[in-house]
Image (tube, rainbow, N blue to C red):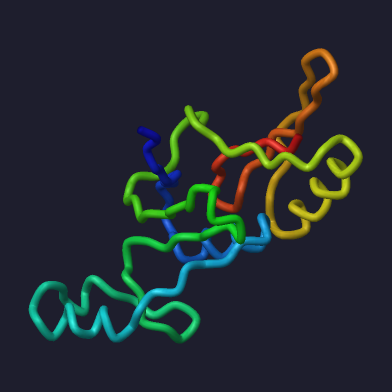
Amino acid sequence: MALDFQVTIDCAGPHELADWWAEALGWQVEPQDESFILRMIQSGAASEADTTRHRGALVWKVGAAIASPDPHRPRVLFQHSREPKQGKNRVHLDVRVGPERQEAEVARLLALGATELWRASQGPYAWVTMADPEGNEFCVA
């Protein structure tokens, strides 16, 4: 039996980072249902302190997700963490664009606010390790 999964990234600003990654990958931020959130508050299952406003919409404070146009790819959830990032990621995303598009993609991501950390290669494969605006590493290959 195949299991479904999502990738979860701890961060300080889940909504802002979801926006950044949606732009970086060409994915969409998943909409949050304001009427559902309001019903949860009215029923006592949640409080207004559990919410915030992002781009004018009422959203859950602790997280935001992005989804690929391809429904077979896992969603990525950005969840609030009070602890700052420390050290190197043990898991990271690889953005695979191919060698012919690598430099253009690195330049585009730099313009969006990424940081180039280092370049490496192994045999015929080369990649650029970068960091998103919160310092989470990812590779462009």
Q: Quarter of the image containing the N terminus?
A: top left
Seen at 78% across and 58% down, the residue is 111
Of all residues, the one furthest to the right in this rendering is 100
Q: Name which quarter of the figure residue 13 lies in.
A: bottom left
Seen at 21% across and 79% down, the residue is 48
Nearer-the-camera pick, 43 or 79: 43
Of all residues, the one furthest to the top in this rendering is 123
Residue 109 coordinates in the image, percent (x, y): 74, 53
Seen at 64% across and 37% down, the residue is 94
Nearer-the-camera pick, 12 or 36: 36
Q: Is residue 58 left or right of residue 89?
A: left
Q: Is residue 140 left or right of residue 6?
A: right
Q: Is residue 17 left or right of residue 105?
A: left
Q: Name which quarter of the figure residue 122 lies in.
A: top right
Against 33, is 109 above or below?
above
Of all residues, the one furthest to the left in this rendering is 44
Residue 104 coordinates in the image, percent (x, y): 87, 49
Of all residues, the one furthest to the front in this rendering is 1
Q: Name which quarter of the figure residue 119 lies in.
A: top right
Nearer-the-camera pick, 17 or 2: 2
Residue 50 coordinates in the image, percent (x, y): 23, 71
Seen at 16% across and 81% down, the residue is 41
